[in-house]
Image (cartoon, grey):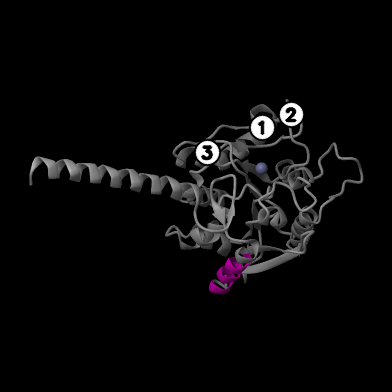
């Protein structure tokens, strides 16, 4: 091989390198056809999300069932997966929600069910067989999700619709998407009097993997020290497993005060360990393994 050929080959190889690299970059920004989100990840249309949930429910009928808990303003069927024991009383209950802001889909909540089912540690099965129930709601706001919009079809921010102590009484929900979810959980708890809502995690995108805890609506209002210590068991695994865990704190200290969030509602109403995970732009797609480890520790703690 003469010098000129080596030179040409080197040039070609570096061109391939650039191509491969740019392809990688594109791939991490766009996953495939579908709805683009602020996370840089495209998701399937809501009707295809429902098909996926149906598939999981039919694959594991002894562990999980499809729950249709209401209708959105644009008449999408609000849909979730419910893991629950079949022959044991429910004594533990956790809820995980995503895309309450329609443009903040992260492809975590919709992959979490199968990822936990297929994880060799088998923690989800163990949790269910010892009385654990888990409601998985990948898309709380389907109308906003299908249009890549923060609010619902009336452009109402659904994460400002959850009553708190400052809401005028009688406290009520204004939007069907939030009311249906709150009502379903309330009635599930009434039907299963041995449990309360133990854990509620809401996935948003994206503020450098930040993790938010109550209280969100008032600056300077914090959990008591005892409560803070209880929360630590659920926060600590995230700090342990994630390569670059984000800051942990209250919304007013880290971002801004926010009235009417799920974060405060689940904690105030049920005393749940309530957390809001803010995700990491573009990286979140590759973080599912860490989410699974985090979830497995949280389920073990319940
Ligand atoms: Zn959000």
Residue identifier under label 2 = 221
Residue 295 point in image, percent of width and height = 53, 50
Q: What span is in magenta?
A: 50-59
Residue under pointer 1: 250
Q: Position of residue 44 (x, y in %)?
A: 58, 60
Q: Which of the two marks, 3 or 1, is nearer to us in this view? A: 1
Identify the residue at horizontal 56%, vertical 32% (top origin).
247
Q: For ligand 1, give the image quadrant.
A: top right
Q: Is residue 53 magenta?
A: yes
User: Image quadrant of residue 159?
Assistant: top right
Specify which label sits upstream in the sequence, 1 or 2: 2
Residue 98 locus on image (x, y percent): 64, 51
From the viewer's perspective, tell me whether residue 87 is left or right of residue 143: left
Disc 3: which residue: 236
Q: Choose the circle earlier in sequence order: 2 or 3.
A: 2
The image position of residue 241, as x and y in percent, is 46, 42
Q: Is disc 2 in contact with disc 3, using a CB cutoff of under 8 Å? A: no
Q: Is residue 129 above or below residue 11?
A: below
Whether tag 1 and tag 2 are in contact, CB under 8 A, the answer is yes
Q: Main secondary structure of the magenta part?
A: helix
Identify the image quadrant of residue 6. Answer: top left
Q: Give the crowd class for mark 3: few <14, some 14-19, many >=20 residues within 10 Å.
A: few
Q: Secondary structure at mark 2?
A: loop
Helix, strand or loop status at disc 3:
helix
Question: What residue appears at the point 52 percent right and 63 percent down from the top-left corner?
Answer: 125
Q: In the image shown, does 111 or 145 lie closer to the viewer?
A: 145
């Amino acid at each position: 091989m003469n010098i000129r050929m080596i030179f040409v080959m080197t040039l070609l190889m570096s061109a391939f390198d650039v191509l491969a690299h740019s392809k990688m970059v594109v791939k991490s920004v766009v996953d495939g056809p579908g709805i683009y989100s602020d996370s840089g990840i495209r998701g399937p249309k809501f009707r295809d999300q429902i098909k996926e949930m149906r598939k999981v429910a039919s694959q594991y009928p002894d562990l999980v069932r499809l729950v249709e808990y209401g209708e959105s303003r644009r008449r999408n069927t609000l849909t979730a997966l419910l893991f629950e024991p079949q022959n044991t009383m429910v004594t533990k209950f956790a809820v995980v929600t995503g895309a309450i802001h329609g443009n903040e889909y992260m492809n975590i909540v919709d992959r979490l069910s199968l990822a936990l089912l297929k994880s060799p540690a088998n923690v989800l099965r163990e949790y269910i067989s010892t009385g654990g129930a888990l409601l998985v709601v990948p898309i709380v706001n389907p109308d906003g999700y299908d249009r890549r919009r923060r609010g619902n079809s009336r452009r109402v921010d659904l994460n400002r619709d959850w009553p708190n102590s400052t809401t005028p009484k009688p406290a009520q929900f204004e939007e069907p998407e939030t009311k249906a979810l709150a009502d379903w959980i309330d009635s599930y708890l009434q039907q299963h009097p041995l449990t309360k809502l133990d854990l509620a995690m809401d996935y948003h995108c994206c503020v450098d993997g930040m993790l938010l805890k109550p209280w969100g609506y008032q600056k300077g209002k914090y959990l008591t020290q005892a409560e803070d210590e209880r929360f630590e068991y659920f926060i600590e695994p995230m700090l342990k497993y994630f390569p670059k865990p984000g800051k942990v704190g209250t919304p007013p200290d880290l971002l801004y005060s926010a009235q009417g969030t799920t974060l405060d509602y689940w904690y105030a109403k049920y005393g749940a360990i309530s957390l809001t995970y803010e995700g990491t732009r573009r990286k979140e797609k590759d973080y599912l393994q860490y989410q699974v480890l985090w979830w497995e520790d949280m389920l073990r703690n319940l």
